[in-house]
Amino acid sequence: MNKKIVKKTTKFVVTSKKDFVVIIIFSLSLFAAVIAALTASLYSLERQVNPGGVKSSSVINVVSDFKTKKSINKSLIYQCSKVPVKISSLRSGDVFGSLKISAIDGNFCEKDCEEDYSGRIYFKGEQILSGTLVLAESGSGLFFYPDKHSALPDLSRGNSIDQGKKLSEIKGLVCGSPNLMIENSEIAKKEIAKKIPELDDLQKNMTTGSSEEKYNKKVIIKVKNMVINYATGGESGTTVTFVELIDILQ
C-alpha cells in the first residue's frame, strides 16, 4: 500500500485586529532598536576619531576649510634655524619661524657682488621678547637688544676677495638675535617712562658724551611689523614697532 507524503505549509494568518496591532508594535520596536544600535555605533566611532567631543560636522568643516585654504595659498613654512634660506626662494605669504613675510623689496645679491645693493624684508605678526632697553644717538634713538636665545629672522652675510676685489654676498635668512631699532621711539619712550621713570635720567646722561645708555634691568616687551633693512653702501639694521612694555624682570 502506497502512502502519500503530504507537506504541510504553515501560513501566518492574521485572524483579528488585535493580532494586527501586535505585529505593528513589534515591527516598530524592532526598527527603533536597529536605529538605536546604529546611533550608538556612530557615536562610539566619533569618540574614537574625535575624543574632545566636537561634533563630526564641525570636524568636517575644519578639514574642508583647511583643504580650501591650502589649495589657494601655496605659501611655504620655514623652520627658524641656522641653515640659510635663500632670499630668492622666499616670497610674500611665506612663514619664517613665527612671522609671515608680507613683502620683499630691492635686490639681495647672493653671490660675487661687486656693486652696491640694498633690500628690505617686511614681516607681519607680533612677538614678545625679553632683553635690554638701550638709549642711543644722544637719547633720540631707542633700541632693544634681545636675549641671545631669541628666535628672530636675520640675514646671514659673507665677504670674500677674488683677484684683489672685495666681494660680498647674502647667504640667506637665518634664525638669530639682531639688535632692534624702535621705529616709534618717541611714543615708546613716553609709554615706557610710565613704568620706568629712570628712563628720563638715562636720557639726561646721554648729554655727557656717552654713546649709549642701557637700562640695568631686563624687560619683556611686545613688538610688531619687523623689517630687515640692508644696504652695502648705507645703513643696515632691523626695525620694529613698539606695542607695549609687558614686564620688568628683577
Image (cartoon, grey):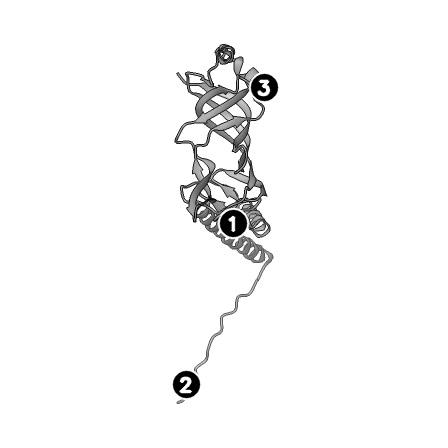
Which residue is more in the foreground, 164 or 202? 164
First of labels 1, 3 by sequence position: 1
Whether pointer 1 and pointer 3 mark residues with C-beta atoms closer than 8 Å, the reply is no
Residue under numbered circle 3: 186
Whether pointer 1 and pointer 2 mark residues with C-beta atoms closer than 8 Å, the reply is no
Quadrant of image for the C terminus: top left
SS at badge 3 = helix
Residue under numbered circle 1: 89
Residues packed near mark 1 inside 10 Å, few (<14), some (14 to 19) or many (20 plus): few
Residues packed near mark 2 inside 10 Å, few (<14), some (14 to 19) or many (20 plus): few
| Three-letter code, disc 3 | Glu
Quadrant of image for the N terminus: bottom left
Q: Residue furthest bottom?
A: 1
| Three-letter code, disc 2 | Lys
Residue under numbered circle 2: 3
Which residue is more in the foreground, 108 or 161? 161
SS at badge 1 = helix
First of labels 3, 2 by sequence position: 2
Measured from the top left, where is residue 240 in percent x and y? Answer: 54, 29
Q: How many marks?
A: 3
Q: Closer to the camera: disc 3 or disc 2?
A: 3
Query: Whole-Å distance between the Cαs marked 1 and 2?
Result: 98 Å
Query: Whole-Å distance between the Cαs marked 3 and 2?
Result: 119 Å
Query: Whole-Å distance between the Cαs marked 1 and 3?
Result: 37 Å
